[in-house]
Image (cartoon, coloured by chain):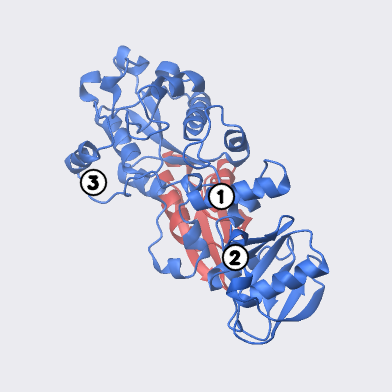
Chain colours: A red, B blue
């Protein structure tokens, strides 16, 4: 499974959401994006963005003071 | 078969844009939201930075509004392009450094580019005549439509019946009679419409979504421009203006002093870009130094930072000064006393 990692450390919301949104545009269905962030707001914002735009949230977790959110691309509903 | 018409809604996250989009959906229009990120948006940043604010529930109101409406939301980064609006607003500033009219014109022009690239038919906003003293007046409504280039592709569903017909109305894509004629600062019509649509929970109105409308923030931004002798800014500048206590002991440097742990952690992220001071002998803040400083400046800065540490009443406080390459130097200083800190240092 193709997984793209994007570094969103130090970015404040909604910039991590915008980075995920940009990455999604160039990836095919089924590809995954892992955003590594330091703003805890991503734990609500990226899942909300994924829901309304039809993408699948794989996980959203805290790890060593960072926040990791993984989204699976689904352009089908767009 | 009738073509499904599509509208792009400018979604701020407030009640008006929520209602405007919903009014269009009621008429069978396919609506998608656009939310512009300028860098000055208030939402979420203090939550992300200040530890005590993290206890509050986090919600991005634009995303929340889109979810309530069941529409897609496209968040667009306009930080770089937006500088021209902040630095040289054709229509000037409002009460603070808020270029509200130029901002609205700019956002509608960006929305126009967006609908052209996505094959959408028109733009909607939640504007209401008389709602805002600068950008939402009877005289400025046509200015926004004209100067953005959107002209009659710009429909304001909440006050459309007080304005000339737009293309979507003339073409019959939208029934003008089902649009609204709200005007003035009263929120009652919006609240009644929200109740009719079953919206009970929405962001409280009031235009507090932009730091440029904040007097204190504007003072700090003006100080930054004055000190640099140049009306420019970078993203880090406008972020740092949102954090900490800002003091300028001399024209050529200022201190950004954290007020709590979350701010200290946030400022620590800038330690490779700015020299900084931390207290060693007592718990205290982290302070960034913005400007070129001499040894005497550093000592003065250290005394000031010591004032905000738990050693403020002691004879001596030990601090560490670290330059941007990581070289560290210990300083033993007497904390400044309140009467030694002129009021004009505080930005």
Count of all numbered marks drawn on residues in the image: 3
Give the number of the mark in front: 1 or 2.
1
Q: Where is residue B152 in the image (x, y as percent from the top left)?
A: 40, 16
- Examine the rendered structure and indicate whether residue B146 appears above or below residue B295: above
Of all chains, the one bearing label 1 is: B
Q: Position of residue B150 (x, y in %)?
A: 46, 20
Closer to the camera, B258 or B25? B258
Label 2 belongs to which residue? B266
Q: How crowded is mark 2: few (under 14 residues within 10 Å), some or many (20 or more)?
A: many
Residue at x 47% of width, y 51% of height: B42
Q: Can residue B174 be seen in this view?
A: no
Label 1 belongs to which residue? B219
* Dot 3: element: loop
Q: Can residue B239 be seen in this view?
A: yes
Q: Where is residue B266 in the image (x, y as percent from the top left)?
A: 60, 65
Of all chains, the one bearing label 3 is: B
Whether pointer 3 and pointer 2 mark residues with C-beta atoms closer than 8 Å, the reply is no
Label 3 belongs to which residue? B199
Of all chains, the one bearing label 2 is: B
Q: Position of residue B94 (x, y in %)?
A: 47, 37
Q: Find the distance from the CA under tag 1 to the CA under tag 3.
A: 37 Å
Instruction: Name which of mark 1 and mark 3 comes first in the sequence.
Output: 3
């Amino acid at each position: 499974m193709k997984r793209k990692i994007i570094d969103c450390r130090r970015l404040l919301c909604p910039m991590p959401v915008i980075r995920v949104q940009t990455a999604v545009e160039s990836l095919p269905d089924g590809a995954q994006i892992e955003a590594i962030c330091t703003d805890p707001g991503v734990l609500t914002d990226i899942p909300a963005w994924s829901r309304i735009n039809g993408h699948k949230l794989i996980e959203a977790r805290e790890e060593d003071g960072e926040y990791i959110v993984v989204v699976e691309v689904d352009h089908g509903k767009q | 078969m009738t073509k499904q018409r599509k509208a792009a809604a400018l979604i701020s996250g407030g009640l008006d844009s929520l209602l405007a989009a919903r009014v269009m959906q009621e008429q069978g229009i396919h609506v998608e939201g656009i939310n512009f990120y300028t860098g000055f948006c208030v939402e979420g940043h203090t939550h992300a930075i200040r530890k005590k604010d993290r206890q509050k529930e986090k919600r991005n109101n634009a995303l929340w509004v889109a979810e309530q409406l069941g529409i897609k939301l496209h968040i667009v980064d306009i930080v770089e392009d937006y500088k021209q609006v902040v630095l040289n607003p054709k229509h000037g500033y409002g009460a603070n450094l808020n270029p509200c009219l130029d901002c609205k014109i700019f956002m509608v022009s960006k929305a126009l580019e967006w609908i052209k690239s996505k094959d959408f038919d028109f733009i909607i906003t939640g504007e209401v005549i008389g709602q805002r003293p600068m950008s939402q007046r009877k005289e400025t409504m046509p200015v926004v439509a004209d100067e953005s280039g959107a002209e009659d592709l710009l429909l304001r569903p909440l006050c459309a019946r007080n304005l000339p017909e737009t293309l979507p109305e003339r073409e019959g894509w939208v029934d003008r009679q089902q649009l609204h004629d709200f005007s003035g600062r009263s929120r009652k019509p919006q609240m009644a419409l929200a109740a009719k649509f079953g919206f009970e929970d929405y962001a409280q109105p009031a235009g507090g979504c932009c730091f440029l409308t904040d007097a204190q923030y504007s003072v700090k931004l003006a100080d930054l421009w004055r000190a640099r002798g140049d009306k420019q800014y970078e993203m880090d500048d406008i972020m740092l203006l949102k954090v900490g206590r800002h003091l300028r002991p001399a024209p050529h440097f200022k201190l950004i002093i954290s007020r709590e742990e979350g701010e200290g952690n946030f400022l620590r992220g800038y330690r490779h870009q700015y020299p900084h001071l931390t207290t060693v002998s007592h718990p205290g803040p982290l302070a960034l130094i913005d400007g070129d400083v001499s040894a005497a400046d550093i000592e003065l800065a250290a005394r000031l930072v010591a004032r905000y540490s738990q050693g403020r009443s002691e004879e001596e406080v030990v601090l560490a000064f670290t330059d941007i390459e990581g070289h560290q130097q210990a300083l033993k200083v007497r904390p400044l006393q309140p009467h030694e800190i002129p009021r004009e240092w505080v930005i």
